[in-house]
Amino acid sequence: MLSFWSNEGEINIWKALNFAEKIISAIDQAFSDIAKVNSTSEMVKRYTDDWWKIDNEYKSFRLKTDSDDQLQTLSRCVRTMYRDYQNQLNEKFLNLISKQKDLSIQGFQKQSDFWEKVASSKKRRAVILVDALRFELSQDLICQCKKSMRDAEISCEPLIASLPTLTPIGMSFLIPARDIKIDVEGSNWQVQSNDSAGNLALLSERKKIYQYLLDLIQQG
């Protein structure tokens, strides 16, 4: 049945309001949950189980509202609430981790142990290294993969990043190299390994290791 509204097409404001309602409700619940969390491992688990959805909904909301002048009042309200949520989340995490003896997160694999797990697999694997792939973006990737590869077994596990969370440090720890050590000289990071004489903080040195490993694979 045709009507006035059926001729109007898709109206952006309704989708934006739907996203806003989901975000506000989720953040309101998260505020309550954050206050009850007593450990960093519990915080990470809550995020990977549920809180990542807030980031995902917020991203979708911004895509719908940033270019629409009619929605800027709503957008400012949601941005403020999201910023407050982020601040409270980060403050609680820093408070909890400052009480620990070290920076480890119990029950979660460290980024530096990644290759040990990959190498222990009997199956051949392809590894794609991505700088700063947020957990909620990986969930989007999984969703797309499941649509196109319905028979595949697909899962997502978090890795605890090496500190400081800078590109030269994080990407160095994703190299299949042994005994990586970090130092800083002035404002320059020095990342050394038993498998490389160069500074792995430099992209050119990281490429050398990958090229060396690729040559070994092709020869074998």
Image: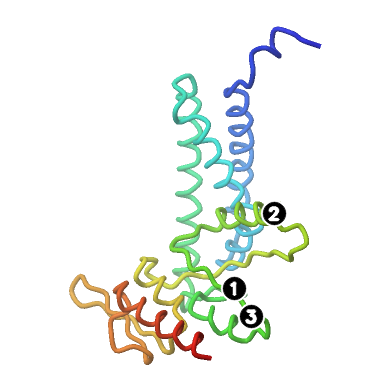
Residue 22 lies in what quarter of the image? top right
Residue placed farthest to the right in the image? Answer: 1
Q: Secondary structure at mark 3?
A: loop
Per the image, the residue denoted by label 2 is 148
Residue 206 lies in what quarter of the image? bottom left
Task: Indicate the position of residue 72 as horizontal and vertical percent values.
Answer: 45, 25
Task: Indicate the position of residue 100 as horizontal and vertical percent values.
Answer: 49, 74
Residue at the spot 46% in from the left edge and 78% down from the top edge: 102
The three-letter amino acid code for the residue at tag 3 is: Arg
Residue at the spot 66% in from the left edge and 52% down from the top edge: 143
Residue at the spot 44% in from the left edge and 69% down from the top edge: 98
Tell me: residue 39, above or below residue 77.
Answer: below
Of the 4 image quadrants, the one containing the N terminus is top right
Left or right position of 39 against 143: left
Q: Secondary structure at mark 1?
A: loop
Q: CA distance from mark 3 to mark 2?
A: 21 Å
Task: Indicate the position of residue 62 as horizontal and vertical percent values.
Answer: 49, 36
Q: Nearer the viewer, mark 3 or mark 1?
A: 3
The three-letter amino acid code for the residue at tag 2 is: Ser
The three-letter amino acid code for the residue at tag 1 is: Phe
| CB atoms of marks 3 and 2 within 8 Å | no
Per the image, the residue denoted by label 3 is 124
Left or right position of 4 against 43: right
Q: Secondary structure at mark 2?
A: helix
Q: Residues within 10 Å of mark 1 (few under 14, many from 20)?
A: some
Residue at the spot 58% in from the left edge and 53% down from the top edge: 34
**N-terminal-most mark, 3 or 2:** 3
Query: Which of the two residues, 160 or 220, is positioned nearer the viewer here?
Result: 220
Q: Which mark is residue 108?
A: 1
**N-terminal-most mark, 3 or 1:** 1
